[in-house]
Image (cartoon, grey):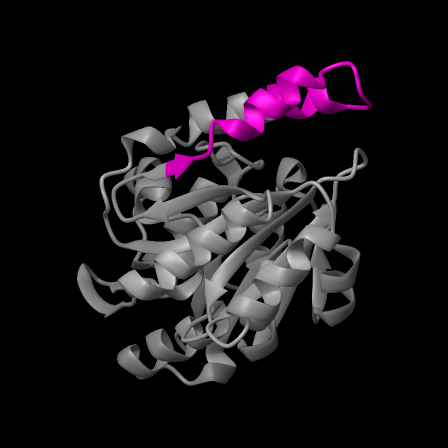
């Protein structure tokens, strides 16, 4: 049997977005695959603190912060936070252009309270009240703290919420040499959701690093994800699978599509490709 290595995104793939509880079918499939000799890694945009609740289910390693931090069998094999200069430059230009920031560190995440204040002040406009409830739920479930509690720890990634595409133009110009802007779907009320990720890494490079470390050929790697921040991971892996609840653009790039996270998609994919 050729040993495979599986890379699982979390939000929208292993769990519902913002949740820390995967379906029992996925937990069982991961256990069975590892017992059969395959490696299973988390490969997520979450920082280490946000994914910590999932470590109780046991994995062979983790890729956190979209590839900025990698552990393989308890050994740290890659660790690349922003430089202090990069962090300050990004924080300043985003604030100057009215973009709300959530910074992700190893031990926690910190967010501009101004975003929720803005939503409260405009709660009657469009779906702002719905977004406010979603935001408060996400902050609670992922332990995201107010920016005033940030104490200068190294930052791996910045999540942004922008009121318009126009407000992103200047930050892109200033930061594009160091950072990739990964923009997600636009909310129906107009806010732009995205991430600013260091060009030194992405999930695809992380797949390469882990496979090289474990001496597993890339063609024996499997990547399963749901959104465009999984794009490089799916492009590099030997087999790429997108969840049915995932991005339409990512579905077009993937080798296969499996049922949604709510429909037992992980177990389905593991069975179909003989991982269990």
Q: Identify the main secondary structure in magenta.
A: helix
Q: Nearer the viewer, residue 151 or 141?
A: 151
Quadrant in the rendering for residue 201? bottom left
* Residue 166 image offset from top left, x and y in percent: 74, 54
Q: Give the mark count.
A: 0
Position in image of residue 57 (x %, y %): 33, 41
Q: What stretch is highlighted in magenta?
A: 110-134
Whether residue 128 appears in magenta in the rendering, the answer is yes
241, above or below 226, in the image: below
Identify which residue is drawn at 56% across, 47% down: 160
Q: Which of 29 and 212 is in front in this view?
A: 212
Q: In this view, does 248 lie to the left or right of 103?
A: right
What x and y, as percent, mark residue 114? 52, 28
- Residue occupying the far left of the picture: 75
Q: Would you say residue 33 is visible in this rendering?
A: no
- Figure quadrant of the N terminus: bottom left
Is 83 on the left or on the right of 251, as rendered?
A: left
On the question of residue 80 being in view, the answer is: yes
Residue at image x 61%, y 76%?
A: 235
Question: Magenta segment: does it hold 114?
Answer: yes
Image coordinates of residue 191 in percent, x first then y, are 71, 40
State left or right for residue 70 relative to residue 136. left
Residue at 73% x, 71% y: name it: 253
């Amino acid at each position: 049997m050729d040993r495979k290595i599986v890379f699982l995104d979390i939000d929208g793939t292993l769990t519902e977005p913002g949740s820390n509880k995967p379906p029992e079918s996925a937990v069982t499939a991961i256990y069975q695959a590892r017992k059969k000799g395959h490696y299973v890694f988390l490969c997520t945009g979450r920082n280490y603190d946000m994914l910590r609740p999932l470590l109780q289910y046991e994995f062979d390693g983790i890729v956190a912060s979209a590839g900025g931090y990698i552990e393989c069998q308890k050994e740290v094999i890659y660790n690349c936070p922003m430089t202090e200069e990069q962090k300050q430059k990004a924080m300043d230009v985003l604030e100057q252009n009215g973009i709300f920031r959530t910074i992700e560190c190893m031990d926690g995440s910190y967010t501009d309270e101004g975003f929720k204040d803005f939503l409260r002040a405009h709660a009657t406009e469009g779906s702002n009240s719905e977004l406010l409830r979603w935001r408060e739920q996400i902050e609670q479930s992922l332990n995201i703290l107010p920016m005033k509690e940030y104490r200068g720890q190294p930052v791996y990634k910045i999540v942004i919420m922008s009121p318009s595409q126009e407000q992103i133009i200047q930050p892109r110009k200033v930061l594009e040499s160091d950072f990739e802007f990964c923009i997600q779907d636009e909310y129906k009320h107009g806010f732009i959701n995205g991430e600013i990720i260091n060009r030194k890494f992405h999930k695809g490079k992380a797949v390469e690093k882990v496979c090289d470390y474990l001496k597993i050929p890339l063609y024996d790697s499997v990547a399963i994800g749901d959104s465009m921040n999984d794009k490089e991971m799916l492009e590099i892996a030997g087999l790429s699978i997108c969840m049915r609840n995932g991005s339409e653009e990512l579905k077009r790039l993937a080798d296969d599509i499996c049922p949604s996270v709510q429909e037992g998609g992980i177990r389905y994919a593991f069975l179909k490709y003989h991982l269990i």
